[in-house]
Amino acid sequence: DNPTARVLAEAELDFNLASLAYMQATGEIGGKKDPTKFQAVVAALSDYPDRYAKSAPALALYAYDLLARSHVELGQRDKAEEAYRSMVKAGPDSPLVAKLSTVIFNSHYDKVKALSLELDSAIKSSSPKVKEIAADLANARRATVAFGRDYARTAPQPQYGVLFIALTNADELRAYARHAAATKSEERLAREEKTGVDTGFHAINPVNGERIPIFVADY
């Protein structure tokens, strides 16, 4: 009886059961998403890395990934970020890091978009909840800003235009992004005159220290 082999087998079994529950929750198995099952995934994986980090480090990283994704599905972005940072600490060079940072950032940005729409609706209807929604939106933007640093640093192809919009709350940027997205790439390339919108951000030229304005452009 090999204790190491036994622990590794237990780690694989526990992870496979949690992974199966996650696929059932997302609808990958069964064909229908069941959000009520994400909590079971969280319960199964919350202490998994502590139990198996030494015996099964690769599986521990995947456990952090599924744990964070489940927290995202449950709207628990702060807990998703905790799992993400634990993953980065345990395996900073893992390809899972970049993918997970994108998932979490998109979740933050989706929250910002939803609250922006809710605020617009509340203002139009003179709802008494305008101040409350505005405060929630400000908090959501701050959370997006905070995590945006990780996203910009780790994502393989970060959507900088989306990031700038989330950070600046610029109506002009949002309108421009919607217009560009609605225009076919062939049409944009065919136009002689290129367009763009100043983000309000600057980059520093490392050669001469000059501040260079950063634009969101459609080419």
Image (cartoon, rainbow, N blue to C red):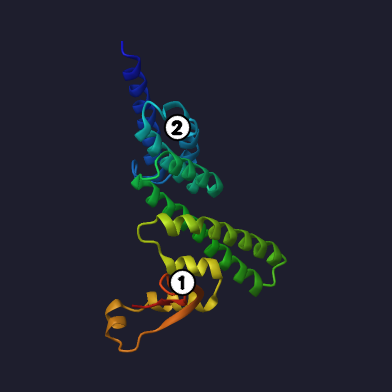
Identify residue type, mark 1: Ala
Residue bearing mark 1: 203
Q: Residue 67 in the image: state x and y as whole percent.
A: 46, 40
Of the image marks 1 and 2, the number of the one nearer the N terminus: 2
Query: Which part of the image, by quadrant, shows the N terminus?
Result: top left
Q: Which residue extends farthest top?
A: 1
- Quick check: marks 1 and 2 in contact, CB under 8 Å? no
Mark 2 neighbour class, 10 Å CA radius: few under 14, some 14 to 19, many 20 or more: many
Closer-to-camera residue (81/114)? 81
Q: Position of residue 122 (x, y in %)?
A: 64, 69
Task: Identify the residue at horizontal 37%, vertical 36% (top origin).
Answer: 19
Give the side of residue 126 with respect to residue 176, left or right.
Answer: right
**Residue at the spot 44% in from the left edge and 44% down from the top edge:** 88
The amino acid type found where label 2 is placed reads Pro
Q: Where is residue 6 in the image (x, y as percent from the top left)?
A: 34, 18
Give the quarter of the image for residue 127. bottom right
Q: On the image, numbered disc 2 is attached to which residue? A: 49
Question: Judging from the image, what secondary structure is the residue with disc 1 in?
Answer: strand
Q: Is residue 147 visible?
A: yes
- Residue 3: quadrant of the picture: top left
Q: In which quarter of the image is the C terminus?
A: bottom left
